[in-house]
Image (cartoon, rainbow, N blue to C red):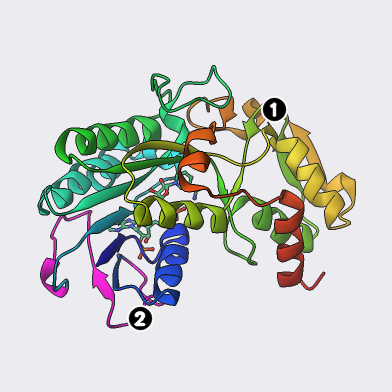
Amino acid sequence: MYLIVGASGFIGNWLYRSLKKRRDKVKGTYFSDNKNIDADDAVYLDLEKGEFGRNAIAGPVKYVVLCHGISSVDRCKLESDKTRKVNVKNTVNYLRTFDPKEMVPLMLSTSMVYNDKDSAPVEDDNPDPIVEYGRQKLEVERFIEESFPRHIILRLTKVFGIQKNDGTIFTSWLDRFEKRETVLAADDLFISPVYVNDVIAVLLALMDKELSGKYNLGGRRIESIHWFCKRVAARFSVPENLVWRVVAKDLGFVETRPKYNSLCSEKVLAATEAKLTDYEKSFDLMAKNYGK
Ligand SMILES: NC(=O)c1ccc[n+]([C@@H]2O[C@H](COP(=O)([O-])OP(=O)(O)OC[C@H]3O[C@@H](n4cnc5c(N)ncnc54)[C@H](OP(=O)(O)O)[C@@H]3O)[C@@H](O)[C@H]2O)c1
């Protein structure tokens, strides 16, 4: 059986739905919102208090897929005690309740475990996080590597969806454009967004092929946020004056962000035989959801 920690979240719910479609046995945890998980599969989990109600999970769990946490970079810094408790301390304590000989953890980590110097780092590059969120993720990565002989760590860049109001990068721009609101787009921060459906295909292949180790997954291109924003605006015929070119300093982040939010995906794509969707194709899928 698969257990998705954070099945009520964005990526966790896509994975949950995909496993259900394949008719796999799956349970999913939620914290504040269980509406997207079938009642029979939903397991309440509170990593703030650290009270683990495992009783709802009957039978052996083969994979625990960690799709949970507080991943706002600014919140991790501003509320470091609270976020460390959820993202690190109680995540580790929860993993300790499983038998490392039977269960394989699959952790969703981040490109922010790297520093701000290099574009598209590979798996063997030394992590050196410059933000608290990245430090928290790296601590859990290290615990997993030391404690579970078989494990999968999948580091991701920004993941985007195609549905209205899903809160991801391109759709949140489109949601603002629809209200004729401007988007502030930095031209000195570089991203490589990856489509959530591609992330799910990679996750399923990593588990189906019983792979182990660390993998990096980013999108097809590395460009500035401003470049992507202009491209989305052009595709959806949005007036150019709604895209405001700014620099990172204008955005008032609590911590300096890494210049690059990108990863080299060569290893994971070779291992899983997955392919990345063209941005144009995902924009076309998005357009259908926006009636364009
Ligand atoms: N999305 C990205 O672009 C991206 C990029 C790189 C890495 N990642 C990593 O991928 C994972 C999934 O990201 P996401 O964007 O799908 O996250 P998300 O939508 O914010 O979902 C977070 C999940 O964590 C659960 N959660 C939050 N606080 C909790 C607590 N105190 N106890 C137990 N569960 C709690 C939430 O439950 P409720 O909703 O029920 O409260 C939800 O299921 C995260 O670990 C993130 O760091 C994401």
The image position of residue 14, as x and y in percent, is 47, 65
The image position of residue 149, as x and y in percent, is 18, 39
Q: Residues within 10 Å of mark 1 (few under 14, many from 20)?
A: some
Q: In this view, does 205 lie to the left or right of 292?
A: left
Q: Quadrant of residue 114?
A: top left
Mark 2 lies on a secondary structure that is loop
Q: Is the magenta stretch mostly helix, strand or loop?
A: loop
Q: In which quarter of the image is residue 9?
A: bottom left
Residue found at x 20% / y 35%: 143
Residue found at the very far bottom of the displayed protein: 39
Residue found at x 37% / y 71%: 33
Which quarter holds ligand 1? bottom left
- Residue 86 is labelled as none
Vertical relation: 243 (above or below) 280: above
Residue found at x 16% / y 74%: 56
Q: In which quarter of the image is the N terminus?
A: bottom left
Task: Name the amino acid type tagged 2.
Answer: Asp
- Residue 247 is labelled as 1
Vertical relation: 25 (above or below) 46: below
Disc 2 target residue: 38
Mark 1 lies on a secondary structure that is loop
Q: Distance between the residues labelled 2 and 1?
A: 43 Å
Task: Name the amino acid type tagged 1.
Answer: Val
Which one is nearer the viewer's eye here, 23 or 196? 23
Write the start and end of the magenta stretch as one range.
Answer: 32-56
**Does 47 lie within the magenta span?**
yes
Q: In this view, does 16 lie to the left or right of 90?
A: right
